[in-house]
């Protein structure tokens, strides 16, 4: 039965438009083969938005993002806009989206496809079967804390200030998401901070511990300092199930975990807001990789992270778990047949373009849905 699901696509900069075109291909396939119809709108963000609107995110684009069921974003940034003032840099458009939509929980899965075990720089036995979910707090912490800025001191030196700030509510709501996710996985949460040197870390550990005792004790909770967690991710990553941490540490640790899988080009993410009175939540989905300006326009980009981000949207925003499973299985099968873009290429495999990878995935979807 046809549905009427709204989706705002923001391809952004660099390879964003190229990988997003492959999502369009899958959306068309779903319309024809799964009778799932999306009302798709497209707009600009990042450098492309600055060029068109004079700002990295136009007010009208933000207003629409607040209305739709989900937003799918490609990537932002590139050397073309490096000289812009800080407030107008492409990345500020993404940060504004996250802040205004109140997307406080960033979900970054680190899943090692069996066909890509050899692509990781770690030994196969370390990463084979890897399946971690990192939950990063996204709207608080040092990226948004005040005061911030750079000032010139009386002696002529310059001083930069960034402020790390967290409240009880900010910590508890993201920890709650982590506990809920763990309940559908292996029932383990590792909370990560720096309680040994940071007051926000002390508060973080206290509040997560309290929340655990308030109806979440069916989950095994552990605590770890962020520096040790970084070491453990490359030493023994399979010890983790769900990791929950703050904005700064989550940024660093999720990229570290991403490379365990062989390529940033393979990994999706979801940024979720609170559930409202209708049961819906604002959500933004995006690949973990950046805009990769060095290969933009060359048809070399890996579209799988963006396609898997769309699969996360199907799962979390549209309640279409079966369709999400189909896309994830199709990606796994395509990789199993040795089809590769340059970022995950290994000897004996077939090197393909961005478009050819999308075509291969849709062909596999046809087989799975037959």
Image (tube, rainbow, N blue to C red):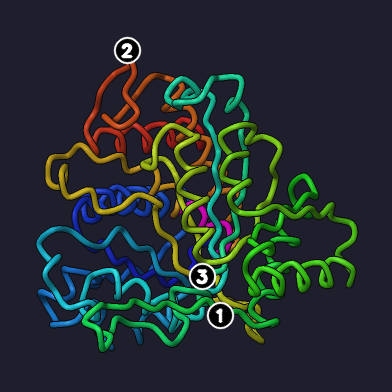
75 up-or-down from 337: above or below: below
**Are circles 2 and 1 on residues that touch, CB within 8 Å?**
no
Q: In the image, which is nearer the foreground, mark 1 or mark 3? A: 1
Farthest top residue in view: 348
Q: What crowding class fits label 2: few (fewer than 14 Cα within 10 Å), some (14-19), or many (20 or more)?
A: few
- Helix, strand or loop at mark 2: loop
- Helix, strand or loop at mark 1: loop
Write down the region rendered in magenta: 310-318
Instruction: Evaluate whether residue 35 shows in this view.
Output: no
Q: Which residue is mark 3?
A: 138
User: Which numbered circle lies on residue 347?
Assistant: 2
Q: Is residue 150 left or right of residue 238?
A: left
Q: Which residue is mark 1?
A: 165
Q: What crowding class fits label 3: few (fewer than 14 Cα within 10 Å), some (14-19), or many (20 or more)?
A: many
| Residue at 46% over, 22% down | 336
Q: Is residue 24 left or right of residue 163?
A: left
Farthest front residue in view: 155
Magenta highlight on residue 163: no
Q: CA distance from mark 3 to mark 2?
A: 39 Å
């Amino acid at each position: 039965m046809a549905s009427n699901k709204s989706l705002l696509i923001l391809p952004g900069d660099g390879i964003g438009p190229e990988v997003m075109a492959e999502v369009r291909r899958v959306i068309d396939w779903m319309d024809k083969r799964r009778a799932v119809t999306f009302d798709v709108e497209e707009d600009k963000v990042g450098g492309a938005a600055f060029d068109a609107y004079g700002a990295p995110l136009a007010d009208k684009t933000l207003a629409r993002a607040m209305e739709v069921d989900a937003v799918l974003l490609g990537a932002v940034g590139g050397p073309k806009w490096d000289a812009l003032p800080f407030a107008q840099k492409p990345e500020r458009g993404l940060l504004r989206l996250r802040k205004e939509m109140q997307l406080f929980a960033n979900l970054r899965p680190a899943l090692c496809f069996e066909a890509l075990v050899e692509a990781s720089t770690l030994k196969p036995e370390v990463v084979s079967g890897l399946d971690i979910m990192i939950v990063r707090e996204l709207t608080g912490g040092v990226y948004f804390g005040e005061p911030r800025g750079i000032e010139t001191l009386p002696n002529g030196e310059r001083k930069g200030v960034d402020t790390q700030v967290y409240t009880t509510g900010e910590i508890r709501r993201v920890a709650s998401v982590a506990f809920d996710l763990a309940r559908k996985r292996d029932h383990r949460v590792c909370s990560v901070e720096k309680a040994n040197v940071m007051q926000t870390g002390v508060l973080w550990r206290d509040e997560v511990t309290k929340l655990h005792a308030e109806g979440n004790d069916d989950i095994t909770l552990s605590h770890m300092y962020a520096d040790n967690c970084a070491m453990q991710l490359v030493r023994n990553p399979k010890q983790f199930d769900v990791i929950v941490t703050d904005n700064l540490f989550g940024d660093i640790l999720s990229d570290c975990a991403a490379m365990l899988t062989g390529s940033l080009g393979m990994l999706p993410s979801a940024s979720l807001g609170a559930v409202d009175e209708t049961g819906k939540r604002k959500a933004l989905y995006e690949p973990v990789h950046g805009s990769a300006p060095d290969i933009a326009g060359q048809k070399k980009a890996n579209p799988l992270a963006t396609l898997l981000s769309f699969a996360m949207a199907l799962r979390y925003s549209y309640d279409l778990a079966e369709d999400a499973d189909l896309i994830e299985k199709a990606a796994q099968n395509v990789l199993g047949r040795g089809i590769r873009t340059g970022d995950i290429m290994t000897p004996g495999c077939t090197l393909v373009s961005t478009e050819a990878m999308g075509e291969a995935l849709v062909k596999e979807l046809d087989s799975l849905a037959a």
